[in-house]
Image (cartoon, rainbow, N blue to C red):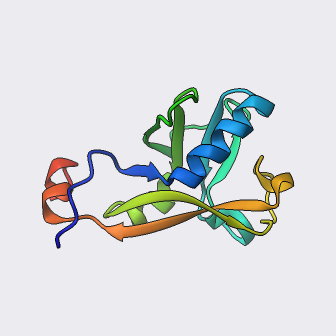
Amino acid sequence: MAEAPATTRVDLTATAAVLLERLERIHGPLMFHQSGGCCDGSSPMCFPDGDFITSDADVLLGTLAPEGVTPIEFWMSLAQYEYWKHTHLTVDVVPGRGSGFSVEAPEGVRFLIRSRLMTEEELTAFGLL
């Protein structure tokens, strides 16, 4: 069965949405940034909104809007975007602790990205074909 076209470039699992709701109660509104750097830089990092300063070197992939949570912007470094622009990303959460400064670290879990190549229809819709 063919996967339905995504209406966004980034999404999240139900498990990630539940965690984000808990994290927002602790830290206030949140944001994601994925740099593609070394160590845990290839994992999506979650920060209190505004704690990571974005610039022209970053691309806003989309806004996540889990129920009961302030909309969360998902940013990616421009260099990383050039590698991943043909993929649809899904933010998920798994047990374990990453080595970064992401706000979920004290919870004993870490965010990760699950990706798939976009369909031709999605690539066209996002202006990539």
Which residue is located at x 68 percent, y 63 percent? 41
Residue 5 is situated, as x and y percent measured from the top left of the image, at 21, 55
Say if residue 118 shows up in the picture. yes
Above or below, comparing residue 24 to residue 125 in the picture: above
Q: Nearer the viewer, residue 85 or 91?
A: 91
Above or below, comparing residue 69 to residue 31 in the picture: above
Which residue is located at x 47 percent, y 34 percent? 65
Q: Nearer the viewer, residue 55 or 51?
A: 51
Q: Left or right? Give the position of 72 relative to 93.
A: left
Which residue is located at x 73 percent, y 39 percent? 23
Q: Residue 97 occupies which quadrant of the picture?
A: bottom right
What is the number of callouts on the image? 0
Q: Left or right? Give the position of 91 relative to 121.
A: right
Q: Residue 124 occupies which quadrant of the picture?
A: bottom left
Residue 55 is situated, as x and y percent measured from the top left of the image, at 57, 37
Residue 70 is situated, as x and y percent measured from the top left of the image, at 57, 26
Q: Left or right? Give the position of 75 relative to 89.
A: right
Q: Left or right? Give the position of 55 relative to 81.
A: right
Q: Nearer the viewer, residue 113 or 94?
A: 94
| Image quadrant containing the C terminus | bottom left
Say if residue 52 shows up in the picture. no
Residue 99 is situated, as x and y percent measured from the top left of the image, at 81, 65
Which residue is located at x 17 percent, y 73 percent? 1
